[in-house]
Structures are given as C-alpha cells and as structure tokens.
Image (tube, rainbow, N blue to C red):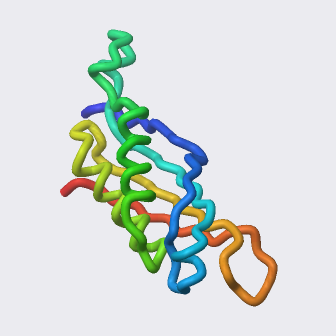
Amino acid sequence: MPDTNIIRIKNAVFYAYHGAFKDEQNLGGRFEVDIDLHCDFSDAAHNDDLERTVDYEQVYAVIKELVEGKKYFLVEALGYKIADGILDNFQLVKQVGVRVRKNNPPVRGVIDAVEVEVKRAKA
C-alpha cells in the first residue's frame, strides 16, 4: 500500500475580483487560499529528488492563474475550480483539500472573513 502524505500550502494571498455584487467585482479584494495535497512522496523523500514529488511552486502558479484569471460570483465556485485544476495538473496528487477565504465580505455585521472548504479526490 502506498504512503499517504500531505504537502500543505498555507495562506497564499491574492488580490482578485470575485463576488456577487458589482462593487466587489469592480474594487476587488484580498483572497487567501490554503491547499492540502494528498500524495505519496516517499520516493522523493528517500531520493531527495524534486522530480519525484509535487513542485509547490508550480501548484502556486496554477492557483494564481485560477484566482486571478477569471471573476466568479461565488467563492464556492472558485474553490471547486482550484481543486479541479490541481487534480487535473498534478498526477501525483490523489486528493486535494482547498480552503478559500474572502476577507471583509460585504455583510451587515463585523466578521473577518468567509471561508469555504472543498475536498476532492481522483476517481
């Protein structure tokens, strides 16, 4: 049975234009993303070889492209797009957890952020 390990990317920060309201889409805001990459990187660890694991700089580039490349009305949709993008682009990743935080959302109250979490796995 292969090992199951996790590579975590914590608090990747982007400025983007997601939201249901026109002001959010025009003014933009700060979005934070956490990623859990479930994969077997035991071969990379034993051989100390980047080519045998998931290059998190490449993962960051995929996340950045998805967060900044298109406007979404819902952070839920953005979370799904990020999860699917990672599973599609990284063979070694068998399951992914994605958390997207939208800071200072436009609600009638005081809250720091709204966060969605998406967990997806390859079939």
Q: Quadrant of residue 52?
A: top left
Measuring from the top left, give residue 115's x and y in whole percent: 59, 68
Q: Is residue 20 left or right of residue 109?
A: left
Quarter of the image that includes the C terminus: bottom left
Image height of 26 relative to 11, above or below: below
Write the residue at 29% across / 58% down: 84
Q: Position of residue 7 (x, y in %)?
A: 46, 36
In the rendered image of this protein, does residue 48 appear above or below residue 106? above
Check the picture and name the quadrant holding the N terminus.
top left
Asked whether 99 or 94 is in front, the reply is 99
Picture quarter containing residue 104? bottom right
Q: Is residue 56 above or below residue 30?
A: above
**Residue 119: percent from the left, percent from the top?**
40, 61
Which residue is depicted at the point 48% across and 49% down? 35
Q: Nearer the viewer, residue 22 or 84?
A: 22
Q: How many marks?
A: 0
